[in-house]
Image: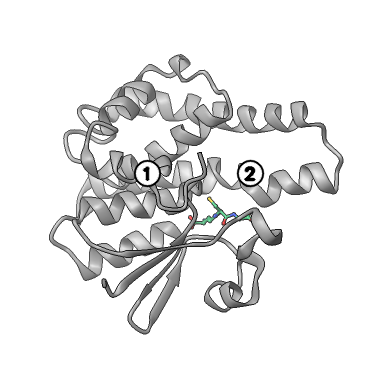
Amino acid sequence: MSDLVLYGYWRSSAAYRVRIALNLKGLKYESRSIHLVKNGGEQHHQHFQELNPNQLVPVLVHGDFTVNQSLVIIDYLDETYPERLLTPSKGAKRFLSRAMAQDIVVDIHPVNNLRVLQYLSDKLAIKDTEKSAWYKHWIEVGFEALEKRLVVSSREFCIGNEVSIADVCLVPQVYNALRFGVDISQFPSIERLYNSLNQLPAFAEAAPELQHDAEL
Ligand SMILES: N[C@@H](CCC(=O)N[C@@H](CS)C(=O)NCC(=O)O)C(=O)O
């Protein structure tokens, strides 16, 4: 049994990022599922709140160390297992890859998170069609900008020819976009990278549908 434990959920794009990172680094880990919907959402249960009072997955436990926030978890993995760095250690690529990762993680993802969507439906009585419009709108705003950046920065990967934290964040966000019916052919670089990255085993094996808690 590995001493790395990832608390996540098959459809959580933030947990998906960490799964890709762990796979790219060739690290074995134990995956524990926190069902975000069943039983009122297990992220709200006491035992999980003790791991993360924010009530969000993912959480990584490594021995007696517990950390949340997917980008910070990936930083921790880079520092602890530096053999294959996902954030380049120096130079422009270091900063460009982090900025692109944050464009996704900080600016696109949070407004479409489950608890935001639940608030729109449950408290503001927004109709499902309006909720989908909200979801698509914020992804498309983010993807338009991302596409412009990728036209300049991408080659085989988001930033040049080395896989980085930007690729790790891109694939789960595109997965979400497709799930909510966004036409990604509007964004040719994003579409190309999504398809080619998914050919790599580290990305393919992290896919939501292949996780032990997937409900298909
Ligand atoms: N910034 C956090 C975001 C974590 C997050 O939003 N996780 C979502 C799943 S992708 C979640 O647990 N949602 C549960 C909820 O909204 O109640 C990270 O990158 O780890």
Look at 77% across and 48% down and name the residue there.
119
Which residue bears the numbered disc 2?
Answer: 111
View extreme (bottom): residue: 64
Q: Is residue 87 visible?
A: no
In this rendering, the answer to whether 187 lies above or below 154 is above
Q: Closer to us: mark 1 or mark 2?
A: 1
Q: Can you tell me whether the CB of the residue at mark 1 lies under 8 Å from the nearest atom of ligand 1?
A: no
In this rendering, the answer to whether 29 lies above or below 193 is below
- Disc 2 residue type? Val
Which residue bears the numbered disc 1?
Answer: 210
The N terminus: image quadrant: bottom left
Location of residue 193 by image quarter: top left
Q: Of helix, strand and loop, which one carries label 2?
A: helix
Mark 1 and mark 2 lie on one chain; the one further toward the N terminus is 2
Q: Which of 121 and 158 is in front in this view?
A: 121
Alpha carbons under labels 1 and 2: distance apart: 26 Å
Q: Position of residue 4 (x, y in %)?
A: 31, 70
Q: In which quarter of the image is ligand 1?
A: bottom right
Please tell me how crowded label 1 is: few (under 14), some (14-19), or many (20+) other residues with Cα within 10 Å.
few
Please tell me how crowded label 2 is: few (under 14), some (14-19), or many (20+) other residues with Cα within 10 Å.
some
Look at 73% across and 33% down and name the residue there.
131
- Disc 1 residue type? Leu
* C-beta proximity under 8 Å, tags 1 and 2: no
